[in-house]
Amino acid sequence: MVAVITGIIGFATAITIVILIRRDYLHVRYGLWWSGAAVGFALLGLFPAFFDSIAKYVGVRSEERRVG
């Protein structure tokens, strides 16, 4: 569920950025950076296993805490 919400937030951010650039409220240079961030959020939300594999490859490890 969290992955879907993160993906939706990423796409909503991307749409908002495009609207702001078209209305000339946001300079294109900054809009490209924000678009990159929005795409990152969307990818993180839609493909979390991909980022887990990258983290494992780089050496970042997450310890899961189990109750019980």
Image (tube, rainbow, N blue to C red):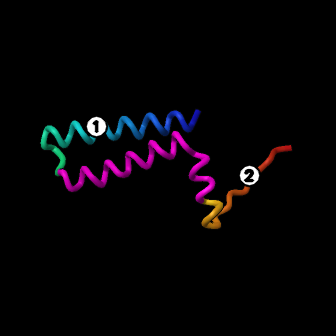
Q: Quadrant of residue 10?
A: top left
Q: Residue 49 carries which label?
A: none
Question: Which residue corresponds to the image point at 68% horizontal and 57% vertical from the top-left?
Answer: 62
Q: Name the residue under label 1.
A: 16
Residue 60, percent across and down? 63, 64
- The amino acid marked with disc number 2 is Glu
Viewer-closest of 45 and 67: 45
Range shown magenta: 28-54
The dominant secondary structure in magenta is helix
Q: Earlier in the sequence, mark 2 or mark 1?
A: 1
| Secondary structure type for disc 2 | loop
Give the vertical position of 63 relative to 7 (above or below).
below
Q: Mark 2 points at which residue?
A: 64
Residue drawn at (50%, 34%), measured in percent from left and top?
Answer: 5
Label 2 Cα neighbours within 10 Å, binned few <14 / some 14-19 / many ≥20: few
34 is within the stretch colored magenta = yes
Q: Which of 63 and 56 is in front in this view?
A: 56
Front residue of 60/68: it is 60
The residue depicted at 38 percent of the width and 37 percent of the height is 11
- Please state, as top left, top right, bottom left or bottom right, where the N terminus lies in the image: top right
What's under tag 1, amino acid-wise? Thr
Left or right of 20? Residue 65 is right
Element type at marker 1? helix
- Other residues around mark 1 within 10 Å, as few (<14) / some (14–19) / many (≥20): some
Drawn side of residue 54 relative to residue 22, left or right: right
